[in-house]
Every structure is written in C-alpha cells, then in structure tokens.
Image: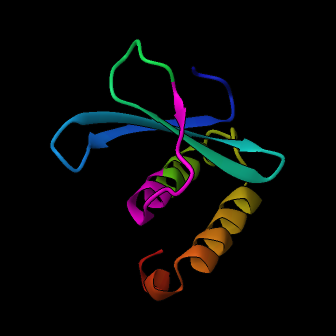
Amino acid sequence: MGAKGEISWKRRGEYGERMEYYARNERGVWKFFQRERRFEKWESYAEPEFDDWLELLDGVRRRIPRRKMEPADEQRLVRTIKEKFPDQKDQV
C-alpha cells in the first residue's frame, strides 16, 4: 500500500476488533478496502459507512495543502457523500 491515490485509516469494528481501511480513486469512483490484521489480504468493502466516508474526506482535505490532491477532488467527494447520505448533509 502507499500509492499516491490511496488514503488509509484505522478504527475499531463492531465487536472491538481493530480494522484497517483504505480507499483509492479509480477513474473518479472511490473504491474501499478493509482488513483485520496487517498480513491479511485486503478485501473489497462494497458499502462503506458514513464514518468511513468522513475519514476519506478528512484525508482528502489534508492532502490539498500538500498539493497531492486538488480542491475539485474535495468538492466531488462532498457531492458524492451528500448523494449517498441525504439525511446527513449538515455533517459534511
């Protein structure tokens, strides 16, 4: 991992287990992946939770000042989040 377009984070799962997540942008579509332990294979994560989208947005926002991503990327991501979670618009 660690490619230019990948953003990763860690959090606890439903049962308290530590989970690792990452997302990458493939042709304008964000693909999410997850794994439980360091040496396990990354599995596709088809339906990311709202919190995972917010972690991704935070990662994109941190990369803009470093010129690794553009403000337009943030705007597209915010629009995508609002479309997927219309009841959470005020939290984005």
Which residue is rendered at x = 45% and y = 60% of the image?
54
Which residue is rendered at x = 68% and y = 35% of the image?
5
Q: Is residue 82 above or below residue 41?
A: below
Q: Is residue 85 above or below residue 9?
A: below
Name the one closer to the observer, 46 or 58: 46
Q: Is residue 52 magenta?
A: yes
Q: Residue 58 at x, y = what percent?
A: 47, 54
Q: Residue 80 at x, y = what percent?
A: 66, 69
**Coloring basis for residues:** rainbow
* Magenta extent: 42-55
Q: Residue furthest right?
A: 27
Which residue is rendered at x = 84% and y = 47% of the image?
27
Q: Residue 15 at x, y = what percent?
A: 17, 45
Q: Residue furthest top?
A: 39
Q: Is residue 18 left or right of residue 38?
A: left
Q: Residue 29 at x, y = what percent?
A: 74, 53
Name the one closer to the observer, 83 or 62: 83
Q: Is residue 20 left or right of residue 59?
A: left
Which residue is rendered at x = 59% and y = 78% of the image?
82
Q: Is residue 28 above or below residue 87?
A: above
Q: How many marks?
A: 0
> Which of the 4 quarters of the picture holds residue 39?
top left
Q: Residue furthest left?
A: 16
